[in-house]
Image (cartoon, rainbow, N blue to C red):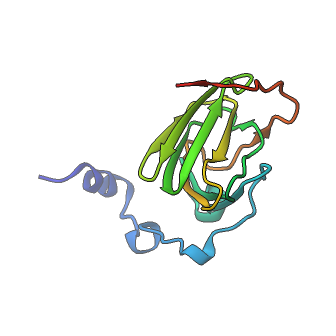
Amino acid sequence: METTALKRDAAAGATDWRHDGIRVVRAGEKSGDTPETLGMNREVAISGSRTGSSHLWAGTNRIEPGASTGPHHHGALESIIYIVRGEALMRWGDRLQWITRAVEGDFLLVPPYVPHQELNASSTEELHCVLVRSGVEEVVVNLDHIDIVDRPEWV
């Protein structure tokens, strides 16, 4: 019995999987050519313009020991953050009034339009994360003038 992909290929003409299949983006091929947020070193690996991705954006970020990012959101994009190394504090809300902690191996889901801020909980180790977004290009809306609460509530 034919698979769905084979049926589709037969109907549409054969796909050149050698050239239109798996794409590897090597560590040294990531680019800093993406919108910036204060306190974060964001690099893009996969995007529509860089690799021809049709649905996703992916990259990494690094936050120096003891540093925090500026408040921001990613518009209509949903985001996944995977903690590769370190310990993150994530604040969110209209006034960044809630906070949670994530460590190596944890995932964070950031819904569309949610104002948030990443903080490196360590004063000695870099925080390193992998990012995946639900669109093909990076959207960053920096929120420089929001009234941030002094003591967020732990969730």
Residue 46 seen in render: no
Foreground pick, 141 / 49: 141
On the image, the x and y values in percent for residue 87 come to 54, 50
Q: Who's the residue at 78% across and 42% down the image?
A: 70
Relative placement, left or right, of 6 versus 103 is left
Q: Who's the residue at 76% across and 26% down the image?
A: 150
> Can you name the residue that lies furthest to the left here?
1
Numbered-mark total: 0
- Is residue 106 depicted above or below 20 in this figure? above
Relative placement, left or right, of 111 versus 141 is left
On the image, the x and y values in percent for residue 16 come to 41, 70
Foreground pick, 96 / 10: 96
On the image, the x and y values in percent for residue 125 come to 60, 62
Q: Who's the residue at 61% across and 57% down the image?
A: 47
Foreground pick, 93 / 55: 93
> Can you name the residue that lies furthest to the right here?
145
Residue 72 seen in render: yes
- Is residue 49 depicted above or below 73 in this figure? below
On the image, the x and y values in percent for residue 129 come to 55, 55
Q: Who's the residue at 66% across and 50% down the image?
A: 137
> Can you name the residue that lies furthest to the front here?
123
